[in-house]
Image (cartoon, coloured by chain):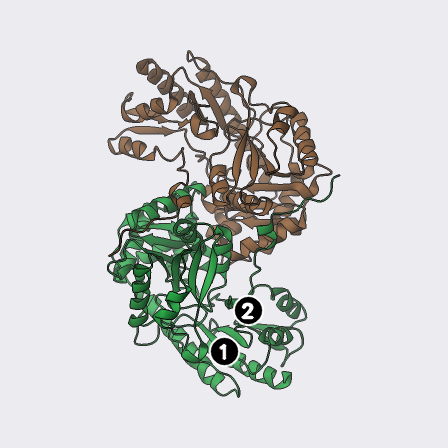
Chain colours: A green, B brown
């Protein structure tokens, strides 16, 4: 036998999920009988809507066949109706069903960007963008945003200074994971001007569209006039229908070339999952679907308020009031938040319980930033969230 | 508004599916009321096993949540059991659940191959390999195989001559789509020696494992001794469980580095579809699952025999007797098979019926090859296949 073969350098260098890499520690704690509260991931505890699951359970599928690569026709029609209800007027040609928002993101990067080019993303950002960038050979250039400033976009000149000949796109997650920011009309206008002036694509990740609790409703990039050819939307039903495991997302653009290329990528993976599409169309065909989503959003707002209240009682924490999504970046009074998160999993127990948070550093590209931060997801019920704050408080006291 | 923005060159150059690109013609024919027999795609008409669908319909899912990126634990255990039944001894660490065989293929290319490197694949080959290669920046170098020779692999020297410094892997589809060939022990041994001598990965696509009708059972690459670190298997339940729309596949390797890197890719897309995994484990946990697959294989063998019989009555066709999968490459007595396939969809009708075949050229990389060939899939019942042959006969007579 010859010497062992080496995998590709891109394979060996592929970034590990900074959120999931601590899972072994959590698993060990659970095996020891410890109750671990998970506020480290965006997996809601809310029941998937009955109408969605009925669409799956009561389907009369005889042959579970491929769907069209673009998605089942009546699912696409249901989606056009949904977007219309959201005041986003689309035609079937403007969208395709993807295997989760993840695939929509991967396709958007691939179609919009040349290998070796750069994409601007406000930092901190959703960690999986790093994966899409690596898979497509694109570099992420972070736009700095600060907790002290509630993660607002910086001035136009600061963003413009980051743009080079190699910059191909700007990505905004609105509302933002991990910061919870809902960008203002002024910020969206700023992005619009930048992509126009610098000839960039605007990739808009709107999977948390409905998750907004303040006066500012998140504006869809698809409604911006004059940049219709530059706008690509990434979307997913995972959060708004609590159906992460369905793996159903959407890619939408009014740029015909974008959609044609994305559809060819879609053909090369044959089809998005059929069962999730059946669930989705069943749910969207229900006349009162939007009130069901609204009720869920009310619950998240209550959760956010409880979490903010409880965290407010803990000395030394720094955080703003996020208006969207279900995440919160919190600055802890520790030097290295990841060490603290690890210690909470390995050493800290209070009545047999502990909490798992996502270390903040993984959401930043710039070395050293976010080292004292954690991201908390308020995907648990109010009692559990109060207990999370309690555990955090006790943990910090004992840790210092 | 500035001038229109351009998509990436890789996006605009992405290959269109040669099989699906004729769909608009078929749709038009159907809209005119024409019955179109589809032998152009690998979508079986066979019912998805009852046990599979029950696993989906009777699941007591409350929250349709992400599964682990690697797959649900008891699904992985069921898969280990399935592979054991196939005399392929694997451990959970050796495999992961993917979103269809498509994703397994994409991950294998990405992990095994550097951008700009080459992969050897016997030609004609499954067209979507071209998509995986493009997405990962890899070039396909075809190994020539000929219809006259029943698509056997050429001599070792011919293959060795194709290998350069840039060659990183050899891929075999066994049984083969589109040729139906089941490679002999001698051929598999040849591949083993080549990957060892030239330090290549061996990517083995075994999605048609059970679809074999002759004396030679397709050997799994995972059972080859001495190249355990070089072997990566792509697999899928789509065909053997007639569950193409479930989007469940497997990537397997005993090379730990391969699996670690693939799992990181898997984390960046979060999770394979949950419902399909529930169906799969329900099916595999049934004690008589393998007899259900065997009965299905018997039906395919009958279909193959009917199709071969009926095609044998048509003057001027040239084809061998394939022993596996459910495809057949047929040389037609026409100069340009694609024109003929188009004409069958646009102009030819017999009692309001016609047939759709896949033009052969799309399965070849070498320009000009396969121009007089079509691929037929025997995924229809025997009566329909007899009618397909009848329509082909009449079509050819009228066309010439």
Q: Nearer the viewer, residue A397 or A224?
A: A224
Q: What x and y, as percent, mark residue A275?
A: 42, 50
Vertical relation: B146 (above or below) A222: above
The alpha-carbon separation of the residues under discs 2 and 1 comes to: 18 Å
Q: Give the crowd class for mark 1: few <14, some 14-19, many >=20 residues within 10 Å.
A: many
Q: What x and y, as percent, mark residue A313?
A: 49, 88
Residue A255 in sight here: yes
Left or right, A301 with respect to B189, comes to left
Helix, strand or loop at label 2? It is: loop
Vertical relation: A222 (above or below) B89: below
Q: Quadrant of the N terminus of chain B?
A: bottom left
Q: Quadrant of residue B387?
A: top left
Which residue corresponds to mark 2?
A: A367
Q: Quadrant of residue B220?
A: top right
Q: The numbered mark 2 sits on a residue in which chain?
A: A
Q: What x and y, as percent, mark residue B29?
A: 28, 30
Which residue corresponds to mark 1?
A: A330
Q: Looking at the image, tell me whether mark 2 or mark 1 is earlier in sequence order.
A: 1
- Residue B14, which numbered label? none
């Amino acid at each position: 036998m010859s010497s062992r073969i080496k995998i590709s350098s891109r394979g060996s260098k592929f970034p590990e999920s900074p959120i999931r890499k601590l899972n072994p520690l959590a698993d060990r704690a659970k095996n020891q009988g410890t109750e671990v509260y998970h506020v480290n991931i965006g997996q809601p505890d809310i029941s998937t809507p009955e109408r969605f699951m009925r669409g799956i359970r009561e389907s009369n599928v005889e042959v579970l066949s491929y769907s069209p690569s673009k998605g089942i026709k009546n699912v696409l029609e249901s989606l056009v109706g949904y977007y219309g209800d959201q005041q986003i007027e689309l035609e079937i040609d403007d969208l395709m069903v993807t295997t989760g928002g993840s695939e929509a993101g991967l396709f958007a990067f691939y179609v919009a960007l040349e290998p070796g080019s750069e994409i601007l993303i406000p930092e901190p950002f959703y960690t999986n963008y790093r994966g899409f960038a690596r898979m497509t050979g694109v570099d992420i250039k972070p736009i700095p945003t600060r907790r002290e400033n509630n993660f607002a976009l910086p001035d136009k000149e600061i963003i413009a200074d980051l743009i080079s000949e190699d910059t191909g796109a700007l990505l905004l997650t609105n509302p933002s994971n991990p910061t919870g920011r809902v960008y203002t009309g002024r910020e969206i206008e700023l992005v619009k001007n930048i992509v126009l002036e610098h000839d960039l694509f605007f990739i808009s990740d709107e999977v948390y569209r409905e998750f907004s609790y303040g006066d500012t409703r998140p504006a869809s990039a698809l409604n911006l006039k004059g940049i219709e050819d530059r706008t690509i939307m990434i979307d997913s039903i995972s959060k708004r229908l609590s159906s992460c495991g369905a793996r159903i997302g959407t890619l939408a653009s009014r740029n015909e070339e974008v959609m044609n290329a994305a559809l060819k990528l879609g053909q090369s993976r044959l089809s998005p999952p059929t069962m999730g599409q059946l669930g989705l169309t069943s749910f969207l065909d229900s006349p009162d679907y939007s009130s069901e989503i609204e009720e869920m959003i009310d619950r998240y707002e209550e959760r956010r308020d409880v979490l903010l209240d409880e965290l407010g009682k803990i000395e030394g924490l720094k955080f703003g009031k996020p208006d969207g999504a279900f995440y919160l970046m919190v600055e802890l009074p520790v030097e290295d938040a990841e060490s603290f998160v690890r210690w909470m999993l390995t050493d800290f127990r209070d009545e047999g319980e502990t909490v798992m948070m996502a270390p903040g550093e993984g959401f930043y590209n710039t070395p050293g930033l976010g080292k004292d931060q954690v991201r908390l997801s308020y995907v648990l019920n109010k009692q559990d969230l109060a207990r999370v704050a309690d555990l955090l408080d006790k943990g910090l006291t004992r840790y210092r």
